[in-house]
Image (tube, rainbow, N blue to C red):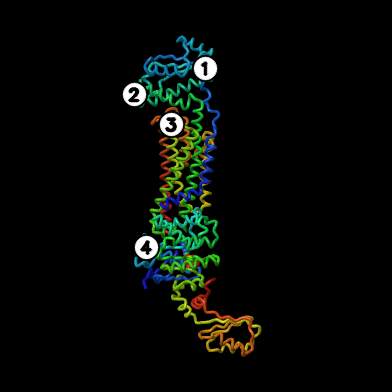
């Protein structure tokens, strides 16, 4: 697979705080790479360093096989960036904003017009082209922010937490749009601290914490890092401690935690854990009002690796 | 081109502010504030004077014929007694004694050693003024023209032209001081409109978030800034042209007389200072609220201290001293000087050239400060 970005031994400190520490990773053509990490883990710093917006102490960055430099305009031409903060002109309409930022890359007027319209359609702002940013809701504003960054049809797109503080409708729209950009051939680096999003759209994930890579791989690869495989939650009216102890002796059960009426059973491995459990409860005449099974989340992986939650 | 167009689109969003300040200029800058204009009040009457010519040279005759035109010359016997009587009975209000050697004295750069006698009344003031003007004019022009007849005709032309504007017709005197007031007031609206709008527009381009977008784009950031600089300059020029057109609408052809052009040149240089100041402030301040706060303070305090609203002569000495460190002081000083100047010539306009030079120095200082400030902020 073709490497679009090669990051080698990247380190960056702010004064005496090591924001990223000896980071190395590659991004491959046509994938959505998720950079997942809690607040302050160094996601934005990583992106800003790759883009040469920050001066870093150590490391080399190659994009499209060439060394990235502040004046590497041929590389920059094919990059689109959506920063964490909304960056638009309050004095310009939705259309004018997209047109301006697109115009920094594309000078041909006709071509630009069609590009701007494509971008508007992608993020679904068709009815709002004449609106000023102040008149847009938070979600629509985020969509505009994205449209401004991708209108010039870049081959490589960085999105830094584009869904922070966004309503579910806009979030779905944004995630769909990102998938569509990937399907159209773009390579995408996506940072977030929402693990659900990463699971939904990313082909590959890098988990960052305190400026270091904790783990790297597909969702399934990462999940296999977690000891547990399945988690069954059971809501019971009454259950004797003898029955609970018996469940603990199941071959695949890792732990059972009783919490009032709730019983959380985690499994290491195994197939049909749920079936086994329900028939067991049936035989013991234990009635339950709710039972459900969950696959482990990336949060569980993160918990496993760091001993803390992804979200603080 | 996109950068350029976008700059103007953003400017257009602030057209309300621009129109507001411009209306203020039209209203306050054109109302007649100088009702007690001395020069305009004794136009119609010509003073009665006696001339005793003891020189009888070409230049002395020139002086006499000038007064024949502008005053009533009374014939009396050339004795002190007769002259004193004439003054006593108010047959004449003013006596001019042209001494022997008047011409030589003038040609050697002197002021002619003319002696006078005055009744001290109302019309004698006018005679006195005519004489002072004449001597001033001939003194200035004698440096440039050595041929006597040419000199005389130049003096007459100068006084003539000058009086068309300032002396003979009542309206034009007031017009000139009104024009001057208009430009003085413009020092406030110009600072406001240039400083305010450019700072607001640039704060949109320079704010951290948009700046990052521009820096990562494939457009050379230096080139981008060059476009912004050119657009800002064009905007300043646009404002000066707008103000000149308004002046023309209000004051008519006076706007484009030699004197009027000097006002325009002065305004143009002043707007350049405002532009440099705007660029400096916008490098320092990126926040729109802070921008409007700072601009208001700068524009208003400068206007009050330098005499944009109130004539400088009414300001206390201490205020005027402080005002010396503000560009508007030098701008307004030039306007006031132009309003009062009798004759225009390169040499007697020297104070104006110095004022303009001082304004340009202000601009250079702002450019240097801006360079220092922006160098610090190059890296994100
Ligand atoms: N300009 C700066 N000066 C000093 N420290 C900074 C600066 N920018 C970031 N940091 C610090 O560097 C670390 C990494 O910050 P960074 O913004 O890269 O994290 P992040 O993963 O993007 O977090 P978030 O999810 O909040 O956006 C944090 O501890 C942050 O406080
Ligand atoms: Mg961040």
Mark 2–mark 3 Cα distance, whole angstroms, equals 27 Å
Mark positioned earlier in the residue sequence (3 or 1): 1
In terms of depth relative to the viewer, which is nearer, A291 or B271? A291
Mark 3–mark 1 Cα distance, whole angstroms, equals 37 Å
Numbered mark located on residue A75 in the image: 4
Numbered mark located on residue B237 in the image: none
Mark 1 crowdedness (10 Å alpha carbons): few <14, some 14-19, many ≥20 = some
Residue sitting at x 48%, y 25%: B167
Question: Taking the image as drawn, is residue B231 in sight?
Answer: yes
Mark 4 crowdedness (10 Å alpha carbons): few <14, some 14-19, many ≥20 = many
Residue under numbered circle 3? B257
Rendered position, A294 above or below A57: below
Q: Secondary structure at mark 3?
A: loop
Residue contact between numbered discs 4 and 1, judged by CB atoms under 8 Å: no
Q: Quadrant of the N terminus of chain A?
A: bottom left
Q: Can you give x and y, in whole percent of width and height, for residue A66 in the image?
A: 34, 66
Numbered mark located on residue B146 in the image: 2
Mark positioned earlier in the residue sequence (1 or 2): 1
Residue A177 located left or right of residue B102? right
Is the same chain shared between marks 3 and 1?
A: yes
Residue under numbered circle 1? B119
Mark 4–mark 1 Cα distance, whole angstroms, equals 90 Å
């Amino acid at each position: 697979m073709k490497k679009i970005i090669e990051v080698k031994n990247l380190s960056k400190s702010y004064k005496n705080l090591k924001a990223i520490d000896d980071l190395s990773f590659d991004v491959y053509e046509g994938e959505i790479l998720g950079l997942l990490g809690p607040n302050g883990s160094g996601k934005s710093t990583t992106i800003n360093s790759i883009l040469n917006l920050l001066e870093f102490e150590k490391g080399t960055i190659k994009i499209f096989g060439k060394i990235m430099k502040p004046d590497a305009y041929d590389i920059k031409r094919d990059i689109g960036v959506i920063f964490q903060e909304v960056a638009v002109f309050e004095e310009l309409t939705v259309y004018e904003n997209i047109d301006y930022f697109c115009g920094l890359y594309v000078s041909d007027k006709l071509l630009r017009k069609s590009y701007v319209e494509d971008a508007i359609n992608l993020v679904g702002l068709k009815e709002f082209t004449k609106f000023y940013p102040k008149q847009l809701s938070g979600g629509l504003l985020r969509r505009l922010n994205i449209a401004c960054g991708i209108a010039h049809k870049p081959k490589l797109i960085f999105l830094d937490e584009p869904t922070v503080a966004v309503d579910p409708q806009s979030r779905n729209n944004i995630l769909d749009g990102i998938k569509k950009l990937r399907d159209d051939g773009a390579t995408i680096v996506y940072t977030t601290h929402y693990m659900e999003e990463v699971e939904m759209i990313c082909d590959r994930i890098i988990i960052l914490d305190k400026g270091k890579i904790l783990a790297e791989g597909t969702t399934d690869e990462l999940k296999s890092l977690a000891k547990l495989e399945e988690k069954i939650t059971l809501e019971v009216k009454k259950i004797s401690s003898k029955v609970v102890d018996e469940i603990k002796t199941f071959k695949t059960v890792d732990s059972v935690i009783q919490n009032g009426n709730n019983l959380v059973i985690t499994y290491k491995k195994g197939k049909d854990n749920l079936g086994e459990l329900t028939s067991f409860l049936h035989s013991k005449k234990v009635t339950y009002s709710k039972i459900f099974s969950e696959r482990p989340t990336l949060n569980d992986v993160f918990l496993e690796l760091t001993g803390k939650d992804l979200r603080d | 081109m996109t950068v350029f167009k976008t700059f103007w689109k953003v400017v257009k969003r602030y057209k309300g502010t621009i129109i507001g300040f411009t209306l203020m200029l039209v209203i306050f800058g054109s109302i007649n504030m100088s009702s007690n204009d001395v020069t305009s009040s004794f136009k119609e009457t010509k003073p009665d004077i006696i001339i005793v010519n003891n020189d009888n040279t070409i230049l002395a005759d020139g002086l006499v014929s000038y007064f024949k035109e502008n005053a009533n010359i009374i014939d009396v016997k050339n004795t002190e007694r007769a002259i004193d009587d004439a003054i006593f009975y108010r047959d004449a209000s003013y006596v001019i004694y042209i001494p022997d050697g008047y011409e030589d004295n003038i040609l050697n750069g002197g002021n002619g050693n003319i002696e006078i006698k005055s009744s001290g009344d109302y019309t004698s003031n006018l005679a006195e003024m005519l004489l002072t003007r004449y001597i001033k004019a001939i003194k200035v022009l004698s440096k440039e023209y050595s041929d006597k007849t040419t000199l005389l005709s130049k003096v007459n032309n100068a006084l003539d032209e000058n009086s068309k504007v300032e002396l003979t017709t009542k309206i034009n005197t007031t017009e000139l001081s009104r024009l001057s007031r208009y430009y003085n007031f413009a020092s406030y609206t110009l600072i406001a409109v240039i400083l305010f709008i450019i700072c607001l527009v640039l704060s949109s381009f320079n704010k951290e978030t948009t700046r990052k977008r521009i820096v990562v784009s494939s457009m050379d950031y230096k080139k981008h800034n060059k476009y912004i600089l050119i657009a800002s300059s064009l905007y300043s020029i646009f404002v000066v042209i707008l103000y000149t057109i308004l002046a023309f609408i209000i004051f008519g052809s006076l706007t484009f007389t030699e004197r009027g052009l000097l006002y325009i040149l002065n305004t143009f240089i002043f707007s350049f200072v405002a532009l440099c100041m705007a660029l400096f402030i916008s490098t320092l301040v990126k926040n729109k609220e802070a921008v409007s706060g700072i601009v208001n303070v700068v524009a208003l305090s400068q206007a009050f201290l330098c005499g944009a609203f109130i004539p400088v002569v009414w300001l206390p000495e201490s205020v005027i001293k402080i005002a010396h460190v503000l560009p508007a002081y030098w701008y307004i000083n030039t306007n006031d000087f132009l309003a009062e100047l009798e004759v225009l010539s390169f040499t007697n306009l020297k104070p104006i050239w110095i004022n303009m030079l001082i304004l340009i120095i202000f601009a250079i200082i702002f450019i240097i400060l801006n360079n220092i400030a922006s160098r610090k902020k190059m890296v994100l």
